[in-house]
């Protein structure tokens, strides 16, 4: 058996993963460990999950999906695709989903994963209660309406403990149709920003910042009319992958065909099982008010990016109040970059992007490739000092700390 790596293959983990099959077994493992980190589905692109101590997975814990009137309680190791199928069967839904339905609920929430939509917060913004195993092996439950520590506990980067259960808000199930447009002039991305991103429940714009044409995916509530030509763009003449040169076999249904929310909001179908991705990813979150300025900065860097970029995606995310959320306190534009898998070549380009975007208030994604240091992250994320104090409260001996946390969120 070869060494364990993350999904992208750019990180080799230092320890073998252990997968307890019950919560009491996991509690004993946590209590006895000197150092411990949790590995989800491995879709982070840096060493956020790595440890020289004990590496654990919660995927083998008993699966729980308990649907109440307006919430669902799930075991942390479940993947979104499993939860959403169960909700849809009962006529319920989540507010939004990420690009892949294969990621774990706990891992996605703990790192600030998001979808798109002017009124849609991060996936973590749906969490109303969280249960985790603390450093002493005991269970801790925090709820949105009662506990002041809750706002720092959901997007926690694994620093407070091992999440074993989450309660999520739900709403009545809804239907979405997905229409892809080719040829949006790149200049209109900034000039018509408000119209573009208000045009559907969820909108994604794909560009490499050099090509004059942008591809836009509009995910609309069923019954919303759409035009064959729109803002200089035209409806695609077939299915599309976010990367134009890639086959669209595994993309979710396009062409305006109405379907359940859980089969349209992700970019890729659940029945497609991602293999190791030959890519790296970075992402930066800027205040919505500076979107057009950020686009101009990226267009100016387009030729610099050209040799290492596969595609960039622009999305919008609504403000929330979770401490380490990329949209904490402000409506946000997410600027995502998929790179070739060559970190030596990619890092200087990432540094150039940060030089351009951090002065605009950009926040790096916690689980992706960035070059910002601890001081820069404290400037980007104003609640970092509060979070560091919270982590010390629940983990005073630093059992859940690793090199990543010691570097970027030093105690």
Image (tube, helix red, strand yellow):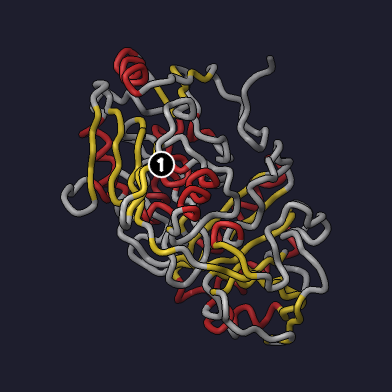
The residue that appears at 28% across and 46% down in the rendered structure is 129
Compared across the picture, whether 288 is left or right of 192 comes to left
Q: As displayed, is residue 401 above or below residue 246?
A: above
Q: Nearer the viewer, residue 12 or 235?
A: 235
Measured as percent of width and height from the top left, residue 316 is found at 50, 68
Q: Nearer the viewer, residue 304 or 27?
A: 27
Q: Is residue 386 left or right of residue 202?
A: left
Instruction: Choose top left, top right, bottom left or bottom right for residue 287.
Output: bottom left
- Report the front residue among 85 and 374: 85
Q: Height in image: 289 above or below 250?
A: below
SS of the residue at dot 1? strand
Q: Position of residue 147 (x, y in %)?
A: 17, 47
Q: Is residue 374 left or right of residue 214?
A: left
Residue 81, position as x, y percentages in the image: 55, 46
Which residue is depicted at the point 62% across and 23% down?
4
**Count of number-bearing discs:** 1
Residue 74 visible here: yes
Query: In the figure, 6 relative to 97: above or below?
Result: above
């Amino acid at each position: 058996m070869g060494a364990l790596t993350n999904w992208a293959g750019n990180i080799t983990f230092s320890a073998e993963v252990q997968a307890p099959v019950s919560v009491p077994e996991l509690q004993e493992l946590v209590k006895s460990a000197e150092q411990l980190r949790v590995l989800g589905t491995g879709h982070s692109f840096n060493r956020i999950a790595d440890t020289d101590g004990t590496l654990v997975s919660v995927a083998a814990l008993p699966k729980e999906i308990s649907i109440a009137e307006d919430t669902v309680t799930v075991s942390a190791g479940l993947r979104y695709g499993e939860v959403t199928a169960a909700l849809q069967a009962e006529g319920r839904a989540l507010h939004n989903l990420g690009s892949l339905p294969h990621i774990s609920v706990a891992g996605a929430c703990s790192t600030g994963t998001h979808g798109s939509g002017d009124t849609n917060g991060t996936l973590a913004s749906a969490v109303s209660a969280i249960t985790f195993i603390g450093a002493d092996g005991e269970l801790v439950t925090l709820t949105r309406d009662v506990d002041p520590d809750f706002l720092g506990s959901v997007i926690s980067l694994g620093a407070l403990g091992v999440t074993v259960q989450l309660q999520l808000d739900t709403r009545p199930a809804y239907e979405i149709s997905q229409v892809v447009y080719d040829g949006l002039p790149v200049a209109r991305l900034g000039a018509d920003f408000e119209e573009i991103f208000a045009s559907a429940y969820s909108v994604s714009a794909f560009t490499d910042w050099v090509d004059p044409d942008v591809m836009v995916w509009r995910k609309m509530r069923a019954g919303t009319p759409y035009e064959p030509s729109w803002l200089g763009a035209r409806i695609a003449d077939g299915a599309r992958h976010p990367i134009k040169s890639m086959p669209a076999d595994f993309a979710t249904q396009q062409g305006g065909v109405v379907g359940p929310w859980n089969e349209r909001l992700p970019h890729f179908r659940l029945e497609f099982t991602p293999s190791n991705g030959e890519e790296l990813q970075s992402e930066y979150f800027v205040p919505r008010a500076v979107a057009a300025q950020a686009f101009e900065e990226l267009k100016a860097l387009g030729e610099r990016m050209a040799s290492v970029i596969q595609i960039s995606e622009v999305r919008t995310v609504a403000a929330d109040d979770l401490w380490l959320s990329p949209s904490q306190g402000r409506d946000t534009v997410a600027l995502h970059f998929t790179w070739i898998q060559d970190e030596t070549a990619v890092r200087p380009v990432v540094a150039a992007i940060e030089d351009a975007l951090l002065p605009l208030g950009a926040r790096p994604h916690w689980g992706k490739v960035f070059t910002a240091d601890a001081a820069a992250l404290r400037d980007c994320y104003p609640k970092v000092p509060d979070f560091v104090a919270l982590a010390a409260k629940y983990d005073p001996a630093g059992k859940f700390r690793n090199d990543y946390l010691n570097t970027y969120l030093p105690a």
